[in-house]
Image (cartoon, grey):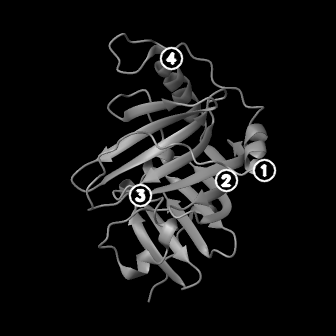
Amino acid sequence: MIGIAGAATTAAAKVGAAVALLTIALSLPAVADDRVPLPHLRPDHMAAAAASATAAIAAPAISPVISPNSRFTPDQQIALAHINAYFNSFRTMQGQFIQFGPNGEQSEGVFFLERPGRIRFHYRPPSHLDIIADGSSVAVKDGSTNTQNLYPLSKTPLRYLLASHIDLTNENLVDSVREEPDLISVLIVQKSGLVDGKLTLIFDRKTYELRQWIVTDAQGLNTAVAIYNVSLNRPQKPALFRINISAD
């Protein structure tokens, strides 16, 4: 789940698609096409589960302010205001995920999120990956090789998911919005001296709930994660987000 530069270490490369979702590519040039990627199709059983996952959770009531000077349409501004209210309304989230790699490979597992800065992705067999963010670092543990690699959270797209507060109505942050019949995609393009890449957040058009995200690395490769059976604001155990570093 992290995209890394071609100069990454051999050990880190072994985690493959898992690394592609956590760290956007660091040194390769960004692709020219900045359109929002199409949402990845979900299996039928996931679509049904996602539709009912948080049906009882009402979207926060807001009164969007429409700016005539915005590059987004009034409908897009309203949608972004509702998405922003929902996205900042929860402190914890947990559920199941399925990951789609750039070559069609799939893996799945469970995740636990606690803002600010903490998340845990535990993969089901045959994968042996376990990914933990503890507020400052991200650890990618590969049980098949008994290795663990650490990355700064600030250099990964997870920082947007895990921020204490994020303003998705900010035109300096949101590059573009794509509207589909059932989904709305919000594209964040990250460009700096160290990091180039894209993060697409995909929300339900009616409830504004987060359904998927897609990381596009500097080579233009997409890795998508769809979430379902989601619960919000449930207490989380601190041990879930503890990175164990053993001394040699």
- The tag earlier along the polypeptide, 1 or 3, is 1
Q: Nearer the viewer, mark 2 or mark 3?
A: 3
Residue type, numbered disc 4: Asp
Q: Which mark is residue 153?
A: 3
Q: Is residue 10 above or below residue 202?
A: below
Q: Amino acid at mark 1?
A: His
Asked if the residue at tag 3 contacts the one at tag 2, i.e. Cβ–Cβ closer than 8 Å, the answer is no
Residue that numbered label 1 is attached to: 45
- Can residue 235 be seen at all in this image of the molecule? no
Label drawn at residue 75: 4
Q: Of helix, strand and loop, which one carries label 4?
A: helix
In space, the residues marked 2 and 4 are separated at their CA atoms by 36 Å
User: Residue 188: horizontal and vertical position, in percent?
Assistant: 40, 40
In this view, the residue in front, 27 or 219, is 219
Q: Which mark is residue 212?
A: none
In this view, 222 is above or below 58:
below
Report the residue at 67% width, 41% height from top: 233
Residue at image point 43% right, 17% down? 73
